[in-house]
Image (cartoon, rainbow, N blue to C red):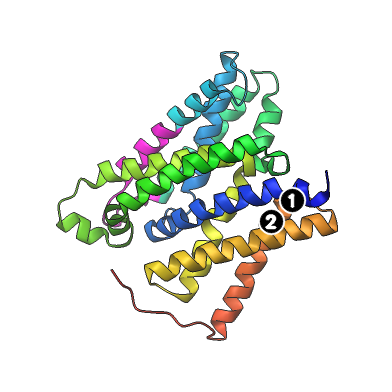
Amino acid sequence: MTGLQLMLPPFMACMILVAMLSYLGLHVIAREVIFVDLSLAQMAALGSLSALLFHIQPESPTTYVFALVATAIGALLFSLTRTSERGRVPQEAFIGIVYVVASAAAVLVANKVPGGGEAVEKTLVGSLLWVTWPTILKLAIVYAALGVFHFVLRRRFLTISFHPAEAEAARWKIRWWDFLFYLSFGVVITLAVPIAGVLMVFSFLVVPAVIANLFTSDKRRLTVIAWGSGALASILGLWLSYTQDLPTGPLIVCTYGLLLIVAAILRKLRIGEQTAPTG
């Protein structure tokens, strides 16, 4: 197998992850819940580790069920703690508390199961280079279904994320819609973390959305810029990893950081023009 053949599965996995995560990142930025993916990822990791307590094989369908149940609990907590107005305690505080408690619980569980330490490490770095085509196919199918789900409900989700006052005025059941949003978000994270790891997933989610928001506020352009910048950073990271023989995951994360710096400099030089918000 040549080097290019070896890098093709990671490339395809990155493109699928970028397509979904960079779009969801726009919602995360609009909702000001930047660390929600870390928190949900840690809940998923806690669920997966908990499955090991019952002697269930890692990466089995039952393990994913444990992870999804834990993620659903996190989604419920986040939907219940969101308020339309800034209160005494910002939602980001609750998100951070869930992350810390889930992390501590995961460490406790890891100490009780064989291979727990390796499982915790895998949640951080993932296994992008060793991703298989069956895993990529499963990821593509699930993400395509979730993409259709978000497209059908885009008016609800976009309004609640970008114009929450309008959703309140329309008397929508915001907590119910938030639960659906975070549950779908949790499914995305649950499948992404074993492949890419928490650090790379966070980069895929947040950095393209931040870059897009530097240049526009139009929702369609936000999506295009987020997808484009995420794909560019991933391709550069994979290419440098292949040509320079460097660790793929950390290099892709650093590439995202460098691209953000370049975008910020371009914005300071007034290259790119912000547009007025559109519905």
| Magenta residues (range) | 71-91
Q: Position of residue 193 (x, y in %)?
A: 58, 40
Label 2–label 1 contact, CB within 8 A: yes
The amino acid on which the numbered mark 1 sits, given as a three-letter code, is Thr
Q: Quadrant of the N terminus?
A: top right
Write the residue at 28% across / 58% down: 159
For the residue pair 19 and 103, the one nearer the viewer reads as 19
Please, is residue 117 above or below residue 192 in the view?
above
Q: Is residue 78 magenta?
A: yes
Q: In which quadrant is the C terminus drawn?
A: bottom left
The percent position of residue 137, horizontal first and vertical second, equals 57, 39
Please tell me how crowded label 2 is: few (under 14), some (14-19), or many (20+) other residues with Cα within 10 Å: many
Q: Secondary structure at mark 2?
A: helix
Q: Is 180 located above or below residue 224 in the figure?
A: above
Residue ID for mark 1: 248
Residue 217 visible in rendering:
yes
| Left or right placement of residue 17 versus residue 69 in this view | right
Front position in the image: 71 or 57: 57
Q: Which mark is residue 252?
A: 2
Q: Is residue 222 magenta?
A: no
Q: Is residue 50 above or below residue 74?
A: above
Instruction: Give the image location of residue 114, x and y in percent.
Output: 69, 18
Q: CA distance from mark 2 to mark 1?
A: 6 Å
